[in-house]
Every structure is written in C-alpha cells, then in structure tokens.
Amino acid sequence: MIVLCGLLALLPVTVWLVTTFWHEAKLIDITEDGRNKLELYRSNLQGAIKEHEYLPITLASDKRIIDLAIHADPVIAKAVNIYLEKLAADSGASDIYFMDQNGDTLAASNWNSDASFIGRNFSFRPYFQQAKSGLTGHYFAFGITSNVPGYYISHPVRPDGTSFAGAVVVKTHLETLVQRWARGSESVLVTDQNGVVIISSNLDWRFRDLAGLGNNDRPRLIASRKYGDYPLEPMPLLDGAWPVDDSPAILSLGPVASEDEARTANEQATGKVQTRQTTPDKTTYLVTASTLPKQGWRMFLLTDKSVLDRSVISAGAMGGAAHIILTGLIFIILQRRRAMLEQLEIRDWSQRELERQVRLRTTDLMNTNQRLAEEITERSRTEDALRTAQAELVQTSKLAALGQMSAGIAHEINQPLTAIRNYAENAMKFIARDNKETANRNLQRISELTDRMGRITGNLKTFSRRPEQDNHPVDVPAQMQMAIDLAIESGRAGVENITLHQHGDVKHVIAEANQLTQVFTNLINNAADACQNMANPEIDIAITGGEDRVIVKVNDNGHGILPENLPKLFDPFFTTKPFGDGLGLGLSICYGIIRSFGGTLRAENRPQGGASFIVELRYDGPGDTEPKNSISTPAFTAAKTPSETRTYLANHHDQG
C-alpha cells in the first residue's frame, strides 16, 4: 500500500515531465513545418511578382517604344497605345504605360478608358526615380488614378544605350494571390519596408501598421496615398512582439478595431464584399518570419497556439494514463506476490500433512508390495506364452506369403501355356495346309511366350518386396494390341467383339513392356469373363493421351461389380468367380505392377451397365503415389482436339 501511494504521489511529476518534453518537441515540429510552409508562400509570392518582370525590360528595347521616346509623335503614340493594350490583355498585366524623361505618360494600355494614364505625370513615384537612376524599379502602392493596389515594375529606356529617355512601367495585380491565400487555412501576412501589412490571408489585417509608425511617418504615408484611403491602424497586438529575425516568437492578437472602416476600405480595394468571420477576444499565435531582401519585405506565418496546447494536453493525459496503468500493474503484481506467498504457506502445511499420511500408509504398502511381487511372477509367465504365440504367428504369416507367391506364379503362367497350346495346334494345321508363313508366325509367338514365362518366373512380383525392373519407354497402343491378339488367340469366350479407340497424342510411357502386356491381358480376360453370358458381349477399350499421362479404359457390358466388392477388389485372394475358376490374385498382381510404374489402377461401374477398369500411366515414370483401392481418383484432363482411331476385331484369326 505504501508503494502504491508513493507511485500515485509521483503522478503530477510524470505529467509535468511528459508535457514539458512534448511541448519542446512539438514546438520544434511546428516551427519547422511553419518554415516549410512559409517557403512555399514565399515562392508563390515571388512567382506572382516575376510573372511580368520581363515585360518592362523587353519593351525598353522595343523599336516602337524607342521611336516614341525620341520623336514623341502622336501617330507613333497611337500605334503604341494599341500595341500596349493588346500586350496587357495577352499577358494578364493590369496596366502597361510609357513615361518620357519628365515623367509624363505618352502611351498606355488603358488609353481608351476613363481612367487613362495618358497625360498624367508620375515622376514623383519611386519606381520612376529608380528607373531614372538606371535601375529596374520595384514598388507596391495604390494607383493614383484607379485607387487599386498593385505592384509596379519599371525599366529605363535608353535609345543610345546611355541617355535616359523615359521609362516603361508594368503594373500587376496581386489581388488574385490575396484571394487565394484568404481561402487557405493558414494565417500569413506580408509587410513592406514601412512595416505596413500589404498582403494577408486575413483581409481585416491588410494595410495595418505592424511595426509601429511614428507620429510623423503616419500622416506622411497617408498623404502619399501609397496605401489608398486606409488609415493605417495598428495591428491589435496584446502580448509578445513580432520577430525581427528568423527566430520563432509567440504573441497574442485581439480582434481588429474599426471593423466597419476596414470592411469599407477592403471593398474599395477589391471591389468585392467579404463576409468576415467572428474572431475571439484573444488569439495566441506561434509566429515564423522570413525576409524578401529584393523588395525589402517581411513575411510572417501565424500558427494558432491552441494546436500546440491541445497536443500538450493530450500528451499529458496520455502520460498520466500510462502512469496510472503502470501503477495498476505494479499493484496487481504485488497482490499476486502476496497471494503466491499465501499459497506457499498452504503448500508447506499440505506437505507436512502428506508426509504424515505417507507414514500411516507405509505398512499397507509393504503388504501390497508382497502381493504385487506374486502378480509380477504370474505376468512373466503369461508374457513368455505370448512371445511363443507371436513367433508361431510370424511363421504362419511367412508360410501364407509363400503360398500366395506360388499361387500367383501358377495363375500368371496358366495364360501363356494356354496360348502356347493354341499356337502349336494352329501351327500344325497351317503346316498341313502348306501355309509356312502363318505357321512360322505362330512358332515365333510360341517362342515369345516361352520367354515371357521365363521372365515371369524370374521376376516373382510379391507384395512384401519389389525387385529391380527394366523400365523404358513403351508404346501403350502396341502393347494393348498385343494383349488383344493374345486374348483372341487363346479362344476365350466373350472376346468376339473388341473395339479399340485412340484419342489425342498418346506418347510413350515409362514401364516394362512384358508386365504391361500382362496387365492388359488380365484386364481383357476379366472383361471377357464378365460379359460371356451376355447376348451381345462387347469390350470397348479407349486410350487417351493427356498433358502428363495416358489413361486406358477397359469397358465391358457385363453384370458389373457389386458396390460392397469395390473397396476390396484388388485384395489378394479376393474373387467373385465360382470355386476353382480363379485364385483372386490377377487384379492384385496387376495393381502392384501398375503401382510400380508410378501409375494407378481403379474400377467403377458404368451408368449404362457393365464395369470399367481405368489405368493411368505417367510419361515420366514412377513417382510418389498414394495407394488407392477405391472407385475414384483425381480428375484427368484429356487432349482438347482428339483424333480418333477405331479398330474392330471380331473372329479375324483362323483358329482351325
């Protein structure tokens, strides 16, 4: 509790430190941001001034202006008037006029208006005196004739390059810039060399005394009409002082005095009625200043200090909240520590109580240990009997695997033996007919089947171990045709009508040719057995080439496969044939062969009746595939523009 009270007592210190640090950091950010904005305003103002700075310099060397300066001919003056009028309209300048060496205006762009400068003498204007002394004049003032403020730029005219013969003056409006600044969100103002505000985003501040004019200067400036009819009232400075260099300052301004007078003067200056927003009694600003040395002007950016104050208050509130949260966390930690100490005391008491209970039960445990020793002895005898039974089970499994392997060999050799017998009988008949070519072909097939029987007994495909095999590119349609020929030559019932279709670009697959023929032969024989009792038995074989694999479908129109038999169709020794007609190893061996090629074998029932066995073989050979003994595999996309080849085989071999 003492620690908690101490932390709460430090809360004001934390808030003070946070607000002090944040005030300094935020003040630096606002000052830097003000300088960047002030530089943009400065560039904007200088761009507006320089927009027409080239005109008097260019016109001072124009032949028409020089001729008018030398001869002062009314005819030349008339032509110059028209020229200057068009030039002012094209360039956007307020007025362009030429004064002779005495300051009399000989030509002007407003020659055709009621407020024409022609005949007026402006030699008293500083810009004329600057041009007479050989300089480019710059001057801001209200027009004597138009009573509209503007920025005057003058340049001397020297026909012979040395003698002063007059001055060309261009007056440009800055009111567009003033209106644009007034629509902005920042408060910015510009003072001339007299300290009078000549440009401001706050229109009520225009033409007010910022520097504090003396008693003699104010009447003199008012009489010169440099600032029109404005009385040059002082800015309502309440606290602080305007910065005299580029360092930031803080000051307070009150509402402007003589609002009706300021509004009337502003309407006279701009010709527009401005709606003035109500202002508070006192506003404190952070002021950033910059100097325009060429004009001798000063530019000020005023940022409302309430932005800084609100930020500091928010930072103080966040610092205080963080301090309170930290205090709460410390309080929670202390409370948890106290609870843990209490739990430790309870645990020590529980430990002592437990030891007492242990001592009380030691005697019971000794008696129990004796009984457990007897049970362990009995369990050891039981485990010895279990190990003996497991050894006998392993031996039985080995014998079953050996029987499965022997049955598979007998099943696979049975087909070639049947074909050899048929080929031999046919060969004798062909020899008797003196058809040696066909007889030689049958003898050649007998030789090939003999080699196949040798490879079958040599490869011994089992389910527990797979020996190395010679996989190479194999032509799937050719092996299928060989399997069809073998099935037809065997004279098996149900193979009278076999149709072979080929779709798409069928490439060679990586497999072992003899084993692939063995698989196709087994599938064709199974299809023949399935439809041998049908009125019109048909076996339809389709080979389709895809992007990365070949899909082979062996379809029949037989009785189909029972749904409950589909999941176990490829299990060893599973058969749906009558006793003695099959061992149930053909499909299991085929499944293992296709898996060794990196392919899949599956079965499904056809909607129109019969069964379909589907083989998928990859172009790139064996890979990682998941064992699947089901009715579905991932979707396979065939070629989009297949070319189809049909082969109809029906009793085209002479069997007799």
Image: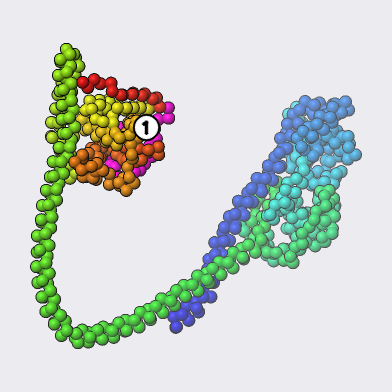
Q: Is residue 558 left or right of residue 64?
A: left
Do we see residue 519 in this rendering?
no
Do we see residue 383 in this rendering?
yes
Quarter occupied by the C terminus: top left
Bin the neighbour count of mark 1 within 10 Å (Cα to Cα): few under 14, some 14-19, many 20 and up.
Answer: some
Residue type pointed to by label 1:
Glu
Q: Position of residue 306 (x, y in %)?
A: 65, 64
Q: Is residue 375 left or right of residue 242?
A: left
Q: Is residue 363 above or below residue 588?
A: below
* Residue at position x 80%, y 53% in the image: 274
Please identify the quarter of the rendering in which residue 465 is found: top left
The residue most toward the right is 114
Q: Is residue 66 above or below residue 464?
A: above
- Residue in the foreground of this view, choosing between 367 and 611: 611
Q: Main secondary structure of the magenta part?
A: loop
Residue 627 belongs to magenta span: yes
Quarter occupied by the N terminus: bottom left
Q: Position of residue 626 (x, y in %)?
A: 29, 44
* Residue at position x 65%, y 58% in the image: 303
* Residue at position x 33%, y 27% in the image: 499
Please identify the quarter of the rendering in which residue 144 is found: top right
- Residue in the foreground of this view, choosing between 427 and 567: 427
Residue 259 belongs to magenta span: no
The residue most toward the top is 434
Q: Position of residue 632 (x, y in %)?
A: 35, 43
Residue under circle 1? Answer: 547
Magenta range: 619-641
Say what secondary structure mark 1 lies in. loop
* Residue at position x 43%, y 30% in the image: 640
